[in-house]
Image (cartoon, coloured by chain):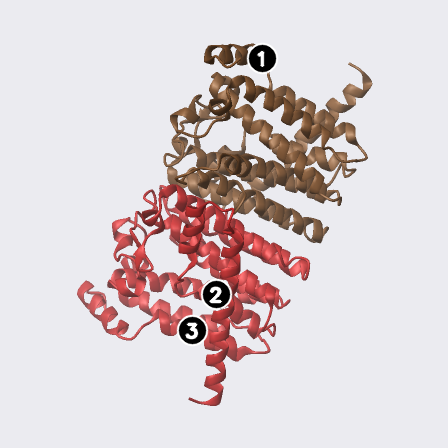
Chain colours: A red, B brown
Amino acid sequence: MLASDLLIFLSRMEAEARIETTLERAVATATVNTCPARLAEAVRYAVFPGGGRIRPGLCLAVADACGAPGSRLAEAAAAAVELLHCASLIQDDLPCFDDASLRRGRPALHQRFSQEIAILVGDVLIVSAFDLVAAEVADLPIPAANILRALARGAGAPVGLAAGQAWESEPAIDVAAYHRAKTAALFEAAAVAGAEAAEVNPEAWRKVGGLLGEAYQLADDLADALGESAQLGKPIEQDRHNQRPNMVTRLGAGEASQRLDDLLARAKQYLPACSQRRKIEEFLDRAAGRLRPSGWRAKVENLARVAGVL
Amino acid sequence: MLASDLLIFLSRMEAEARIETTLERAVATATVNTCPARLAEAVRYAVFPGGGRIRPGLCLAVADACGAPGSRLAEAAAAAVELLHCASLIQDDLPCFDDASLRRGRPALHQRFSQEIAILVGDVLIVSAFDLVAAEVADLPIPAANILRALARGAGAPVGLAAGQAWESEPAIDVAAYHRAKTAALFEAAAVAGAEAAEVNPEAWRKVGGLLGEAYQLADDLADALGESAQLGKPIEQDRHNQRPNMVTRLGAGEASQRLDDLLARAKQYLPACSQRRKIEEFLDRAAGRLRPSGWRAKVENLARVAGVL
């Protein structure tokens, strides 16, 4: 291993540890001993052990790249984004949404606890997300306020996560708006928050976050269609089962895969000037590697051949 | 009508208008034309027309009493508290909670729309609540941050609204903690937010808010037991139906009614020194009048006589 690779490896390990530590702090704050015991257990179950933590990783990588490597505000924002994401997963799995029994390789939260507890954990996570960042307002008022508003934009309506899920209830679905709101909006918030924590203009970073988010949604659609249940940690072919728009169904596997490559390439092209560019490039490369696992290409080609579109 | 009564009447009308205007602004922000149409319609349905707006009224009355009569931060906080309250009502009515079909004299939101939309509207209202106050951080960073944290405490866990609802899922229920969290916590947040907006120490106001909140919960229990469906705008005897702890069942109607009087009296006794004390006294008197409507006393006595406890 080269010395530079070792440094990057150590930097990544450090970022992962900062995310987990901050999430632990948020969970501990919400579940101290006056908290009803089942709620406390369920809040912890919702957050640990985590999935890829890609959204908080993006937030910290952007803050690092912009020259704010130890920012406590970035840590709070990163954990907040992850809490909002965890809340959305719980809801997605509820019987009235996707009715999924498996999440991250374990029983979905409402299966392990109850629907009531699942809904309440969602509330607690959303509230805790804003509380985490509000606690940093005294140190950096304007960046913290901008991050709070970015989180609200990414999580709520008209263009955030909740709006994205609500598109599923519309008689006619705007697929681009649906995917942008359901997935890209929170990636945008993560990237914007990292830039705000470093006190740099967030607009170019919003674009980078949005492109990575679109890529992530496309990779999720591909994994769902290709039957990568182990990779997903949740049941496959859920989109077909739930009659959700899936880009693979719409475009075919070959074109969807090509578009995934394009989105990942564009995310790198749009990177603005920053003092530690290598940090964010490394993050994007690693994300790309995870979104296109080995063996994937052959499966895509096979699926496309079967469908007769290659 | 005396001139002083007229001034108080006009001041109350003004407060009510400020609350509705700020709620309208929040709803408009969340439902602009890119928002999925059904979600937008449901968000508006959740907020308008309102109930008593007692929590935002308390917030503004405290800010007024503390000498910040036109505070935009207090308006944002007041509307935020009401949005959090509206979110909790929607959840309370869901099939997995109280399974109630009627709210504020109309179909409950999940009946009028769907469970998915009801859950998403809850998310949107919580997010919008924090967004409203975050928008005021630039003007008054520390008070706004304190209000954000007070809202989080009142709405989340371990001692807020979500924790209160979660007590219903525990095998053994701590009734005092349950009522404190489910009802009093958001009243406390409302009073604290009003004080913070006026930049005065909020601790005495927290106590006043908590006492009014306890009184409100007790009055709700009494209305439920006395069968005041029209007053409630929702089905009666829901506590018995859902096997919820009800203070009337526990104490008898006579003692519960006496305790309600005591709580309202103590809320006034705990009022701290403030420049416009008459504003908050008038608010508390009016709240007391609404919590003990005419004809109520006779019904309480009758119920207590039937139960043999008077």
Residue B297: mark in rendering: 1
Query: Which amino acid lies under the numbered mark 2 shown in the image of this protein?
Result: Glu
Label 3 vs label 2: CA separation? 29 Å
Alpha-carbon neighbours of circle 1 within 10 Å: few (<14), some, or many (≥20)?
few
Q: Is residue A206 left or right of residue A99?
A: right
Q: Nearer the viewer, residue B290 or A217?
A: B290
**Which quadrant would the N terminus of chain B be assigned to in this image?**
top right
Q: Is residue A51 left or right of residue A203?
A: left
Q: Secondary structure at mark 3?
A: helix
**Image x and y of residue A81, in percent:** 50, 58
Asked if marks 2 and 1 fall on the same chain, the answer is no
Q: Which residue is mark 2?
A: A20
* First in residue order: circle 3 vs circle 2: 2
**Image x and y of residue B236, in percent:** 44, 21
- Which quadrant of the structure image shows residue A72? bottom right
Tell me which chain the residue with mark 3 is part of: A
Q: Nearer the viewer, mark 2 or mark 1?
A: 1
- Residue occupying the point 59% across, 39% down: B81
- Mark 2 vs 1: CB contact within 8 A: no
**Image x and y of residue A35, in percent:** 49, 47
